[in-house]
Amino acid sequence: MDFRIFNGTMGMLCLWMLLFPSCMDKEHVVPILEDGRYTIQLGNQIMEIDPSTGGRITSLKLDGENFLTDENVDSFNWGSTFWPSPQSDWGWPPSPELDNKPYTDASMGPVVKMVSGKDPKTGYVITKAIRGKTTTASFLITYSITNTSDSVQKVAPWEVTRVHINGMAFYPMGAGKRTGGLLPLVTERKGIVWFVYDGGGLPTSGDRQLYSDGSEGWLAQVNDSVILVKKFEDIAWIDKAPEEGEVELFASDIRKTGTGYVEIEHQGAYQELEPGESLVWDVEWFLRKLPPEITPEMGNDRLVEYVRDLIQARP
């Protein structure tokens, strides 16, 4: 199970064991700490994580090229972060305690583990635990949300990753719906939804989002010949947070600066947490250079099969 709820002393002990594998674990590389930031290197892949900036994933590089956007593109929205969902519970901006203030560094062995401060509005505390897995050349990310308030609350986990414009996102469509201002810019072919970035076609008013159901538990983004695939537990449309989607996309306004970013996002199930309870949500990232025989274009069946083979997912 990718979703778990823990309560009480024994529950927190189980959570601690999940977030701290054995230091002798040979399947996972040991992170390097330098100038307050961690790097996890898997061959030609390097992930950088900064506990002092909301425990954020600040870069993800393949052969030295950062797949994520940095603060030079947008000084507030950059890298990869994690929020509680739905957004209607907190509006905008996100809680600094959860999004960009320093996290407590509790890393050990192969795990970069960071714990947020308490959000004064919701009482949520977020924990992030990140490992690099050598056998699959992938990054394992375990998020937890703990309800430290005195009341029962409902929440879903939400990963938000900013990537460069002029790329293409795609994912398998589920049985639910698609809504949002980006709807005219997406195409569904053979059960796969494709969003090819078109700066000139972005909405000039209203939202620039897509809210969608998914299936198979994956979402992919291609920029040039590099692909990032996120693997997660698939959820039913009825289990999503209110006014949200299992898969979401956002395209920033580029009219003022001529540049921007795209957010590739996904969410887990909307769950009830008693005071003191935690939910745990697992995500796995795969970063690869596409084989030369696979063209990164909309509707390419070989590209879809490449993703399914990579993460061992089947419809």
Image: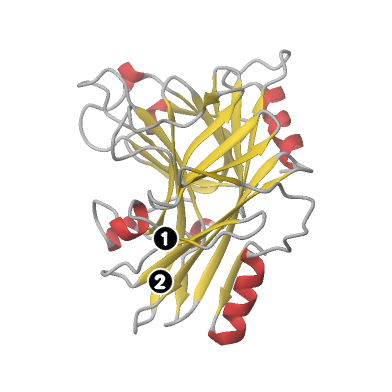
Question: Picture coordinates of residue 188 (x, y %)?
Answer: 53, 31
Element type where label 2 sits in the image: strand
Earlier residue among tags 2 and 1? 2
Task: Give the camera-side residue of 28 and 255.
Answer: 28
Q: Nearer the viewer, mark 2 or mark 1?
A: 2
Question: Picture coordinates of residue 19 (x, y %)?
Answer: 62, 64
Residue 85 seen in the current view: yes
Element type where label 1 sits in the image: loop
Q: Is residue 236 left or right of residue 300?
A: left
Question: Picture coordinates of residue 153 (x, y %)?
Answer: 38, 75
Q: Is residue 230 above or below residue 183?
A: below
| Residue bearing mark 2 | 154
Q: Is residue 91 left or right of residue 283?
A: left
Mark 2–mark 1 CB contact (< 8 Å): yes
| Residue bearing mark 1 | 241
Between the residue at mark 2 and the residue at mark 1, the CA separation in whole angstroms equals 9 Å
Q: Amino acid at mark 2?
A: Lys
What's the mark number on residue 2?
Answer: none
